């Protein structure tokens, strides 16, 4: 049954990722919000739901290290794998979209998170700090969206790939189906894959940083692949940036309310720095306006495989 759960979870993730992108892009068209901002909120929250559910469950099951490994591993996978694999399929024209502000916020969130980890176990006080930072970033995104909406009154824009004739009930259906299907599919896949790994004698620590991290990053991967196929590069890149911010600020912030998360020395010496280094690899695509080509996809994917090799 574990293999059946894994396959069903993967199929559900792909279908839910497609539905969420459809709903988010069409919602942005209807209410005058750019697809990038929608991806930083609705899409990012929806695709990060598995990490939140698994992190809370890990703390309640008295394995809080799994929660930290899940988030750190997922952030690394989001950049190297979630952007790398879709770039192998087709060039992502990220140079057409300005993600500088949201990217700088992601770097700030990463540095803040690492600093708090070096200050000892992550307790509820540090969790509140992370949640306040999240609230400030969401407020900034909403303010930017309101400004864009005011400008749109004078200059009508077209969101590529969106259906102007789609009905509100259908938009709502796509969003709900995506937000429900993604965490459900991820839970099925991770549960099945974890049981398979344990059966073959793989340690829980390695599972947290690799199998669980990859499993909970599959919603981002599914959503990004579908976004690239639909030529929505702004949703693809914005989804990764938004999800990484949400992972660090919201998931760990909320999880600390359920219990203290100890920080293993290995994270301080290696994994946190790999996560930050992976984030810095996006500088050419954000500030130099370079597209994510197949060559970039090969490099990012190869780096992630090298990271897995070191862990294993």
Image (spheres, grey):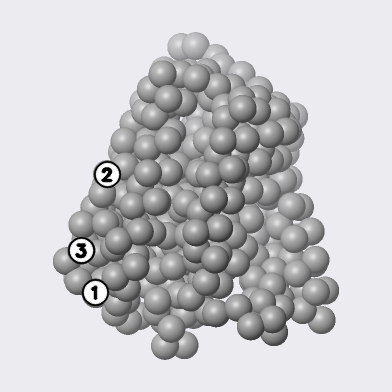
| Residue tagged 3 | 118
User: Cβ–Cβ below 8 Å for labels 1 and 3?
Assistant: no
Give the quadrant of the N terminus.
bottom right
Q: Secondary structure at mark 1?
A: loop
Q: Is residue 150 visible?
A: no
Q: Position of residue 170 (x, y in %)?
A: 73, 45
Q: Viewed as shown, does residue 121 lie left or right of 47? A: left
| Residue tagged 2 | 108
| Residue tagged 1 | 121
Q: Between disc 3 and disc 2, whose residue precedes?
A: 2
Q: Position of residue 229 (x, y in %)?
A: 73, 33
User: Cβ–Cβ below 8 Å for labels 1 and 2?
Assistant: no
Q: Between disc 1 and disc 2, whose residue precedes?
A: 2
Question: Residue 102 appears in which quarter of the rendering?
Answer: top left
Tell me what residue is drawn at x 69 percent, y 81 percent. Answer: 200
Q: Nearer the viewer, residue 59 or 119?
A: 119
- Dot 2, crowdedness within 10 Å: few (<14), some or many (≥20)? some
Above or below, comparing residue 273 to residue 280 in the picture:
below
């Amino acid at each position: 049954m574990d293999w059946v759960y894994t396959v069903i979870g993967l199929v559900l993730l792909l279908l839910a990722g497609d539905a969420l992108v459809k709903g988010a892009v069409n919602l942005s068209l209807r209410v005058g919000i750019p697809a990038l901002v929608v991806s930083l909120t609705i899409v990012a929250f929806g695709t990060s739901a598995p990490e939140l559910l698994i992190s809370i469950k890990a703390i309640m099951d008295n394995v809080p290290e799994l929660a930290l490994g899940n988030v750190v591993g997922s952030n690394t996978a989001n950049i190297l794998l979630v952007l790398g694999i879709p770039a192998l399929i087709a060039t992502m024209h990220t140079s057409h979209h300005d993600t500088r502000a949201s990217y700088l916020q992601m770097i700030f969130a990463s540095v803040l998170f690492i600093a708090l980890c070096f200050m000892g176990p992550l307790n509820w006080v540090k969790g509140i700090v992370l949640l306040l930072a999240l609230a400030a970033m969401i407020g900034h995104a909403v303010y930017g969206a309101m400004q864009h909406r005011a400008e749109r009154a004078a200059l009508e824009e077209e969101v590529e790939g969106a259906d102007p004739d789609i009905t509100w009930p259908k938009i709502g259906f796509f969003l709900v189906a995506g937000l429900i299907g993604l965490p459900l599919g991820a839970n099925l896949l991770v549960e099945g894959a974890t049981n398979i790994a344990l059966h073959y004698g793989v340690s829980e620590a390695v599972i947290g940083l690799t199998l669980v991290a990859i499993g909970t990053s599959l919603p981002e991967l599914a959503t990004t692949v579908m976004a690239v196929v639909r030529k929505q590069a702004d949703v693809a890149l914005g989804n990764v940036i938004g999800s990484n911010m949400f992972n660090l600020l919201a998931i760990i912030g909320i999880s600390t309310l359920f219990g203290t998360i100890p920080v293993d020395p290995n994270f301080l010496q290696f994994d946190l720095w790999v996560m930050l280094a992976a984030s810095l690899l996006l500088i050419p695509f954000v500030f130099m306006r370079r597209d994510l080509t197949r060559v970039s996809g090969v490099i990012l994917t190869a780096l992630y495989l090298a990271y897995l090799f070191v862990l294993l």
